[in-house]
Image (spheres, rainbow, N blue to C red):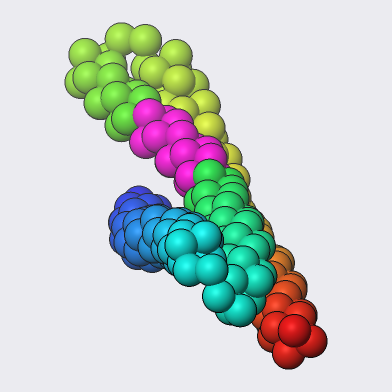
Amino acid sequence: MDGYIYFVWSDNAWLLLGLAMPMINNLNNYILLLDVADSYIKIASGFVQLATMENTSIDRMLTKVSEGFEKVRKIEGRVATDEDLKLSDTLRYYMRDSSAAKNLLYRRLRSLSNYEAANKNLDKARAKNKDVTSAETTQQSSCDKFEKISEMAKQELTDFKTRRIQHFRKNLLDLAELELKHARAQVQLLKNIIANLKED
């Protein structure tokens, strides 16, 4: 029984590490998305400079392209922010839930320690033949408390696994929908920019 709980916690610790690595990678993705948004600013300012330096027939086109890149940059910034918020919320939720599970396992470990101490005290009381009934009562109450918290820990860890899967699934689906929404908005914006350029 005791090894089962340690195994489960060890498994969760590895799972937390396994989840932390993709989150770190997603932080890198967030930084890269912000870099992409910054690149759009540089491209847009380059087009504006070209439009003001050269007094030709393409200056209006360059200005429109610059404005388009500025709008694309805003969408790209929103994508980065939404992705960061969704993923960080998911990780925060998981860390709070993991912390609660860890505290429960710590309480179980303390209860096990109390149970083992009560067993030792009972053995000493039997050896000295003093206060055997009170030691037996203490040992029995410690045993009951340990078994009760062990059952509760089993149930909580099972529920934790179910909640974790549901929460991750929901948040990842929400993230995918947000990314699709932003991608559609970006495609529509680029189509509008191209249509405006063709009009001129």
Residues in magenta, as a range: 94-112
User: Compared with residue 133, is residue 38 higher up or lower down, i.e. above or below?
Assistant: below
Residue depicted at 25% across the width and 26% down the height: 120
Pinpoint residue 182: horizontal percent, then vertical percent: 69, 70
Does 111 appear in magenta? yes
Dominant secondary structure of the residues highlighted in magenta in the image? helix
Task: Give whichever of 76, 14 is nearer the camera.
Answer: 76
Residue at image location 28% in from the left, 20% down from the top:
121
Residue in the picture at 62% in, 66% down: 63
Q: Is residue 33 above or below residue 89?
A: below
Q: Is residue 125 above or below residue 34?
A: above
User: Would you identify the image quadrant in which residue 175 lies?
Assistant: bottom right
Front residue of 122 and 77: 77
For image coordinates 75% across by 84% down, the residue present is 200
Res. 8 image quadrant: bottom left
Tell me, yes or no, if residue 164 can be seen here: no
Q: Is residue 140 left or right of residue 11?
A: right
In the shown orientation, is residue 67 left or right of residue 192? left
The residue positioned farthest toward the front in the image shown? 55
